[in-house]
Image (cartoon, rainbow, N blue to C red):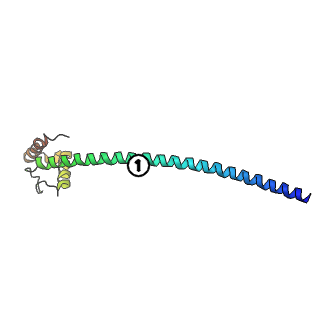
Amino acid sequence: LENDEEIKQLNKEISELNESNSEMEAAMVKLQSQISTMEKNLKNIEEENKIIEEQNEALFLELSGLSQALIQSLANIRLPHMEPISEQNFDAYVNTLTDMYTNQECYQNPENKDLLESIKQAVKGIQV
C-alpha cells in the first residue's frame, strides 16, 4: 500500500511536471513568435530608415545645389549692412532676405524697392 501511495504521488508529480513543461513550451513558442515579429518589424524599420537616409542625401544634394545657385545669382547684390553672400554667411543672408520679403513695409523706400527688384531678377532663373 505504501508503495502504491508513493507511485500515485510520483505519477501526480510527473503529471504536474508534464503540465508545467507544456505551459513552458507554449510560453516559449509565444516568445519565439514575438521575437520573430519584433525582428521583422526591426528589419522593416531598418529598410525604411535606409530609404529615408537616401532621400535625405538626395535632398541635401539638391539643397546644396540650390545654395550654390543662390550664392552665384546673388554674388553681386549687396544687402545693407552685410558682406556679399558666401557659404560662410549664407544662413544670415537668407534670414535677412526672408525678413525683407516678410516685412516689405520696412523696405518701401525707392532704394530698397530697387534692391528687392534686383534680387527678384537675380534669382528668377533658379529652378527649384
The image quadrant that residue 83 belongs to is: bottom left
Left or right of residue 99, residue 19 in this image: right
Residue 115 position, x and y percent, is 9, 46
Q: At 77% across and 52% down in the image, what residue appears?
A: 15
Q: Is residue 112 left or right of residue 58?
A: left
The C terminus sits in image quarter: top left
> Residue 29: x, y in percent?
60, 48
**Numbered disc total:** 1
Q: Nearer the viewer, residue 19 or 55?
A: 19
Which quarter of the figure is the N terminus placed in?
Answer: bottom right
Residue nearest the viewer, comparing 46 with 91: 46
Against 124, residue 7 (above or below) is below
10 Å neighbourhood of mark 1: few (<14), some, or many (≥20)? few
> What residue is drawn where x is 42% and y is 47%?
45
Q: Is residue 25 left or right of residue 34?
A: right
Q: Position of residue 90 (x, y in %)?
A: 18, 54
What residue do we see at 13% from left, 40% from top?
125
Q: Which secondary structure, mark 1? A: helix
According to the picture, the residue beneath numbered tag 1 turns out to be 46
Relative to the observer, which residue lies in front, 11 or 79? Answer: 11
Kind of residue sitting beneath label 1: Glu
Q: Is residue 19 left or right of residue 85?
A: right
| Residue found 66% across the figure and 52% down from its top | 24
Q: Nearer the viewer, residue 125 or 9?
A: 9
